[in-house]
Amino acid sequence: MSKAFSGEMRLRQSMAWIHTWLGLLAGWILFAMFLTGTASYFRPEITQWMQPELRLAPVAPRRAAETAVAHMQATSPDDQQWFIYLPNDRTPETRIFAMPKPDPGAKEPKNRSAEIKLDPATGAALNARDTCGGEHFYRFHFQLQLPHPWGRWLAGLCAIFMLAAILSGVITHKRIFADFFTLRWKKGQRSWLDTHNVSAVLALPFHAMITYTGLIALIVMYMPWPIAANYAKHADFYADAYGREADGDASGKPAALKPIGPMVDAASRQWQGGRPRTIVIRNPNDSAATVTILRSGADRLNARGESITYSGATGAKLSQSSPPGAALTTAGVMLGLHLGNFAGPVLRWTYFLLGLTGTAMVGTGSLLWTAKRRKPGAKPFFGFRLVERLNIATIACLPAGMAAFLLANRLIPAGLEGRAALEVSAMFWTWFGLAALTLLRPVRCAWVEGLALSAAAFAALPLVNMVMTDRGLFTSIASGDWLFLSFDGAMLAIAALLGFGSWRAAQVRVAPPRRQRKAAAAEFRPKELLDVA
C-alpha cells in the first residue's frame, strides 16, 4: 500500500512539474492565442463594424452569383480563373478576385488581382474603407504575425504544450471537481489557485477540444511526410482526397459562358437545400470552361464542403466530389468544431464565453506561478521579475493593443492608402509601447495603470464611433441596428471587466517584511502574554 501511495505521489509530482513548466513557457503566447481566437468567433461581425459605410440587405445566392459573374465579365473577361465568395447570413457582401493568365516569357507567375467587394444585389463595387477587420484577430490567433510558416509552427508547438498541460493538470489535481466549487477571495495564492481551478474545470471539455482540433486543423503542415511519401505534388493529394478536378488548359475556342443561376440552383437542390459558398470559374468564355461550386460549411458541423463541377460552355454537370471517407469526415468535423461556423447566435456566444474562460485559465496560471514564489521581504530573483513583467505585458497590455486596433479604424482617415496596415501597426505599437512603459513603474502600479488604460480604451470605442460615424449608440437604438448596438454593449462590458481588474489590483496590499510583521505583532500583544513569553 505504501509503495502504491508513494508511486502515486511521485506521478502527481511529475505531472505537477510538467504542468507548471509547460504552462509557464507557453503561457504568454497561449494567452494571446486564446484571447484573439475568442474574438475571432465574431470576425464577420467585427469586419462589418469596421466598415460602417456598408449597409446591405440579404440577397439569395443565385442573385449574388449572377451579379458577380456580370461584374467579372465586364472587368476581367480574359483572366484564367475567377473566384467568387458568396454572401451569407453573417457576411452580406460578395467578394471576388481573379487569377491572370500566365505569361510564358515571365520568370515568375503574375500575382492575383486585388480582392473586391460587391453589392450582391447590383454587382457594383463597394466603396468602403480598407481594413483587415476581424480577419486580423483570426490570422494572428494561429500565425502570431510571423512569416509563414514559422508563426504556425510556433502556434502548433504552444498548442502541444497546452494539451500536455491540460492532461497533466487533470492528473495533478486529486480533488479537481471538488475544488471547482471552492472559490476563496482575498486569500493570496489560494485565491489564484481557486480561480485557476474554477476556470479550468468549468470548460475542461471545451479547452481540450479546442486545443486538439486546432492541432488537427493544421496536421498536414505539421506532419507532411505521409503525403510527401505518396504524392509528388500536394495538389495531387487534394484532388484524390476531395475529388476536385485539377486545373485544365483552355482550348482556345471562344464560347459564351452559360448563365450561372441555374447551376447554383441545381447544386443547392442536390445538396438538399445546402447553401453554396464559393464559385471557381476556370478558363471563362472558352469551350473548356468549368464552373466548380463549393458548399458552405456554415449549415452543418463538417466544415469540409462538397463540390460540383459544371461545364461553363454547356451548363452540363461534369463531376462531383466523391463521398468523403472516415478520415476526411473526421478532419472536417474537427475543423468545424474548432471554427464554430456552424453555430447559431446562442451557441456562438457560448463559444465566446468558454473561450474567455480559457483565457482566464491561462492568465491565472501565469499569475499563480508568481504568487507561489513571492516571498515577503526577500529580494526577487531574475526569473521571478521576468515572469512578473511578462505577465503585465501580456495580460494587462494586450487588451489595450486590441482596443487600439479598433480605435485606429475610426481615427485613421477612411480614404488613406495603406490604412489596413496602419490599423495593425497601431495594435502592436500600443501593445509593446505600453508594455515598455510599465517597466518604468512599480509592479503594483503597472498592473493598476495597465488595466485601467485598457479599460479606458475599450470604453472610448462607443464614444469615438458615435463621433466618427452616423451609427452611434443612440442612433443604433433608434434604428434597431443590432450589430452596432451589440458591439458597443460588448465594448462597455469588456471595459467594465478590465476596470474591475484594475480596481482589484489596487486593493492588493504588499505584505511587509518578516521582521516588521513580528514587530507589529509584538506591539499589539497583551502585556501578560509578553511577560509569559
Image (cartoon, helix red, strand yellow):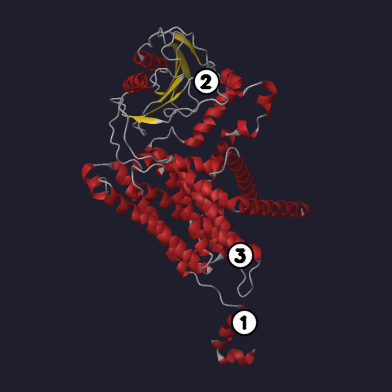
Label 1 vs label 3, nearer the camera: 3
Residue at horizontal 38 percent and vertical 49 percent from the top: 408
In the figure, is residue 407 to the left or right of 190?
left
The amino acid marked with disc number 2 is: Asp
Residue lying at the far front of the rendered structure? 105
What's the distance in space between the residues labelled 1 and 3, CA to CA?
A: 23 Å
Residue at horizontal 58 percent and vertical 60 percent from the top: 368
Q: Mark 1 and mark 3 in contact? Answer it, CB < 8 Å.
A: no
Q: Which mark is residue 79?
A: none
Q: Looking at the image, is mark 3 or mark 2 earlier in the sequence?
A: 2
Residue 511 drawn at (x, y percent) = 55, 74
What's the distance in space between the residues labelled 3 and 2, CA to CA?
A: 58 Å
Q: Quadrant of residue 457?
A: bottom left
Q: Residue at label 1?
A: 515
What's the distance in space between the residues labelled 1 and 2, CA to CA?
A: 81 Å
Residue at horizontal 75 percent and vertical 55 percent from the top: 6
Residue 222 drawn at (x, y percent) = 63, 35
Q: Residue at label 3?
A: 385
Residue at horizontal 44 percent and vertical 55 percent from the top: 400
Q: Quadrant of residue 65?
A: top left
In the figure, is residue 281 to the left or right of 22?
left
Mark 1 residue crowding within 10 angstroms, few (<14) / some (14–19) / many (20+): few
Q: Is 252 drawn above or below residue 331 in the view shown?
A: above
The amino acid marked with disc number 1 is: Arg
In the figure, is residue 524 to the left or right of 82?
right
The amino acid marked with disc number 3 is: Arg
Disc 1, SS? helix
Residue 469 drawn at (x, y percent) = 27, 46
